[in-house]
Image (cartoon, rainbow, N blue to C red):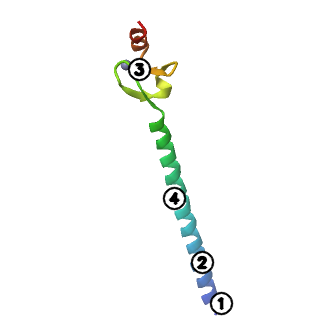
Amino acid sequence: MVRHVAKFLLLIAVFIIAYMAIKNGVRRRDWQRQASGAITEDMVRCKLCGVHLPRSESLEFGDEYFCSEEHRRIAKK
Ligand SMILES: [Zn+2]
């Protein structure tokens, strides 16, 4: 009888661990999707040559973006 209870408790423990692992996995996937979404959202286009680059690597000039100082200079001439 005691062995049966122990087995039953072990089974519950396994279910709880599996449930938590699945939950954590789903949360991690959501987080990754949000992270990659933020990266694609942060892409800007050079006004002169049209190349896509991360906003942090671009040169922002008002509401316009450029891939390099050279392109910014050419466009503003
Ligand atoms: Zn450019």
Point out the tag, 3 or 1, that comes first from the N-terminus. Answer: 1
Q: How crowded is mark 4: few (under 14 residues within 10 Å), some or many (20 or more)?
A: few
- Secondary structure beneath label 4: helix
Image quarter (top left, top right, bottom left or bottom right) of the N terminus = bottom right
Asked if disc 1 is less than 8 Å from ligand 1, the answer is: no
Point out the tag, 2 or 1, that comes first from the N-terminus. Answer: 1
Which x, y percent locates residue 47? 39, 20
Kindly report which numbered mark, 2 or 3, lies closer to the viewer in this rendering: 3
Q: Which residue lies furthest to the top in this view?
A: 77
Q: Residue furthest left?
A: 49
Kindly report which numbered mark, 3 or 1, lies closer to the viewer in this rendering: 3
Quick check: 45 left or right of 24?
A: left
- Secondary structure beneath label 1: helix
Q: What residue type is labelled 2?
A: Ile
Q: Residue at x 46, y 22 (%)?
A: 58
Q: Which amino acid does label 3 sit on?
A: Cys
Which x, y percent locates residue 43? 44, 32
Quadrant position of residue 50:
top left
The disc at residue 26 is 4
The disc at residue 62 is none
